[in-house]
Amino acid sequence: MRYLGEENMRNTKRPVASRVNYANVNIVRKTAGFLFILIPAVMICALLIFNVDILDIQVILPAISMEAAAVVFFVFSASFIPRARRSDDSGPAWFCRIFWLITANALMFVAWSVDFAGYDNVAFVTVVMMMAVIPMLDGLECTVLLIIELIWSYFMSLNMEDPGTDLAVKVGICLVMVLVSRYVYSLRLRLFLMRHRMGGITKDALVDPLTGLLNRRGFDRQVESIWPFCVRNDYKVALLIIDIDNFKAFNDEFGHPEGDDCLKRVSECIMGTAKRSTDIVSRIGGEEFIVFIQGNKEDEMVDFAETIRRNVERMAIPHSHDAPHPFVTVSIGLAIAAPRGMDINMLYEAADVELYHAKEQGRNKVSFSGKVKRRYSALA
């Protein structure tokens, strides 16, 4: 459906529109399920309690129309629930709109039938309220439904003793419910917008703004969620602390803008190596990164760390003249353990000791259990 014409929502149009789309499909689907049960129940009660002839065309036609529309929408909309989350998929919105237009006309036909039987405006008000507040309607949709309501109001008023007065009352009811519908729509829209912005704030609080990687807080949250899984499955876990060698000298020679660009390129290199969905990569400050991996064999984890070291070196980012290596390199401290009986802080401390050892042995190396994996993958 078309939802967002407001200028102040231009930057969040797609995500908020998808939320409204998804909410409408859910709301109307529940309504379809409710009508599927309600319509036969009402028909039976009308026959048994009020002795209404349910085979009368004014009764059976709208009932069959609503029942058929409810069944079709309820069955087919199940596949639309995942699609409705996507702001670029208009299929669920169109299907929702078509169902609601059919239902709206059927409901107005019911109101006309009841009104013809002498129940004044009670049925009409009930139907108009349902049409106004069940789905969230934007301006165009409100206009279409208002036209439908006004057309039916005219035909209903022809049956009254004072058509002019009755039509005026019905038009007034329709206009009031349009205003109510627009107010409900604006409230829900603000709620979705607020949730979207809060989600962005929460995400920003967990992400490093320069590299787009998780910050330390985001890293801790991700590890907390995956740690119990590793404990249950007795998976080995590994933590890599990665430090760019002589980064202060790089900044002093090339300046901070070039330093920021170097950090971005190194972070992309690390992310390009840690490709599994369970790999967690974070920048924890300055030129230091950490990577959490799980489920691998010990040799594979050591090779993984060496691959990161080698890939950074192969980027051949020129280093300062004061650095011992002509290109930017990293030193990596690697700690591996079984997660049961320990926590991430213990693993971090062990990896930090390994990082110190790698630097002490000349940098551009991977240190694990006191062993240093040097260049060309030769274990010391």
Image (cartoon, rainbow, N blue to C red):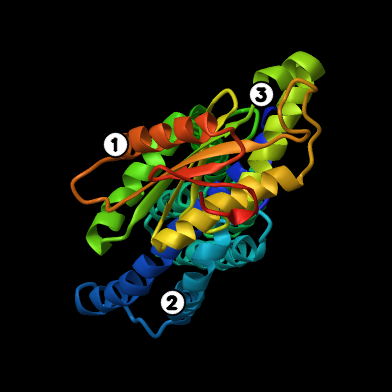
Quarter of the image that includes the N terminus: bottom right
Q: Which residue is mark 2?
A: 67
**Rendered image quadrant of residue 254:** top right
Q: Tell me the amino acid under the disc marked 2.
A: Glu
Q: Secondary structure at mark 3?
A: helix
Within 10 Å of disc 3 (Cα), the crowding (few <14, some 14-19, many 20+) is many
Q: Residue at x 29, y 71 (%)?
A: 42
Q: Residue at x 44, y 37 (%)?
A: 219
Coordinates of residue 349 in the picture (x, y in percent):
34, 32
- Mark 1 or 3, nearer chain start: 3
Relative to 20, residue 354 above or below: above
Q: CA distance from mark 1 to mark 3?
A: 27 Å
In the image shown, does 257 or 65 lie closer to the viewer? 257
Q: Which residue is mark 3?
A: 247
Q: Secondary structure at mark 2?
A: helix
Q: Tell me the amino acid under the disc marked 3.
A: Phe
Q: Nearer the viewer, mark 2 or mark 1?
A: 1
Q: Residue at x 51, y 72 (%)?
A: 79
Within 10 Å of disc 1 (Cα), the crowding (few <14, some 14-19, many 20+) is few
Instruction: Using the rendered image of the protein, determine whether residue 68 is visible from the camera's viewpoint.
Output: yes
Q: CA distance from mark 2 to mark 3?
A: 71 Å
Residue lying furthest top:
252
- Mark 2 or 1, nearer chain start: 2
Q: Which residue is mark 1?
A: 346
Q: Tell me the amino acid under the disc marked 1.
A: Met
Q: Secondary structure at mark 1?
A: helix
In the image shown, does 296 or 210 lie closer to the viewer? 296
Count of numbered marks: 3
